[in-house]
Image: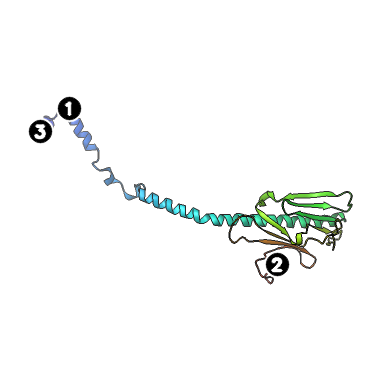
Amino acid sequence: MDEHSGMLGRSQRRHVRLIGLVPMDPRSRMSPAHRGFSLVELMIALAIFAMLVVASVPMYGQFVANTQIRTATESMLTGVRLAQTEAVKRNGTVEFLLDPATGWTVNDVSDPNNVATIRTESFVTGSKQTTVTAANALSRVTFSGLGRIFPKNPVDNTNPLAQIDVTTSTNVSGPRNLRLVIGTAYGIKVCDPGRASTDPAGCP
């Protein structure tokens, strides 16, 4: 026991030893890699995240609108082709009937007194925020057993539906609108009305 130890009691010597075990400044031994974020750094990160979210909202809205436009257009394309295929398969008369507000129906109208529904599709399924417009307010196109379009619809003697435009009902900038054309000259196809007619993806 040294001179200083002899002058201290047992409890005092224990207190001195404990003080010697505790570092005076723990931060001085902490490397920069193990330090946490400061309040300023956290606020900067949150500000950058908020700006990225705000910038992505219009892009996401446009993506959703374009997806619904394509979904509605491809749905009607499927319906028109189904009507043509069923007419050939049944060797009968099959129509594609459009309701721009709700959807479409494919009917076997070989017997006008006994119309048989083949399939019905609603626009609510994946495309409820679209606006569907038929050219000249026409609503049906009818196929013969040879898969050809009747010049006049047998059911009501109206002209056949030849063009359907699809856009979005939401307020987004730059939506990619589509058009479904149905005819003997151009066949049945989906095109982009925003492109030139000479473009393969453009409308005739």
Q: What residue is disc 1 on?
A: 10
Disc 3 on helix, strand or loop? helix
- Which part of the image, by quadrant, shows the C terminus? bottom right
Q: What residue is disc 3 on?
A: 3
Q: Which of marks 3 and 1 is in front?
A: 1
Which image quarter: residue 131? Answer: bottom right
**Kind of residue indicated by mark 3:** Glu
Instruction: Say the numbered circle drawn on residue 123.
Output: none
Residue nearest the observer in this picture, 120 or 9: 120
Name the side, left or right, on which 48 lies relative to 86.
Answer: left
Instruction: Mark 3 and mark 1 in contact? Answer it, CB < 8 Å.
Output: no
Q: Distance between the residues labelled 3 and 2?
A: 104 Å
Task: Look at 82% across and 52% down and name the residue there.
Answer: 107
Residue 83: image location, x then y, percent: 80, 55
Instruction: Say the numbered circle drawn on residue 203.
Output: 2
Name the side, left or right, on which 16 lies relative to 45.
Answer: left
In the image, is residue 3 above or below residue 89?
Answer: above
**Kind of residue indicated by mark 2:** Cys
**Kind of residue indicated by mark 1:** Arg
Q: How far apart are marks 3 and 1 (CA)?
A: 14 Å
Q: Which residue sits furthest left?
A: 3
Residue 24: image location, x then y, percent: 23, 41
Q: Label 2 crowding class (10 Å Cα cut-off): few <14, some 14-19, many 20+?
A: many
> Mark 3 or mark 2, which has the lower sequence index?
3
> Mark 1 or mark 2, which has the lower sequence index?
1
Q: How far apart are marks 1 and 2 (CA)?
A: 99 Å
Task: Look at 10% across and 33% down and name the residue there.
Answer: 3
Q: Label 3 crowding class (10 Å Cα cut-off): few <14, some 14-19, many 20+?
A: few
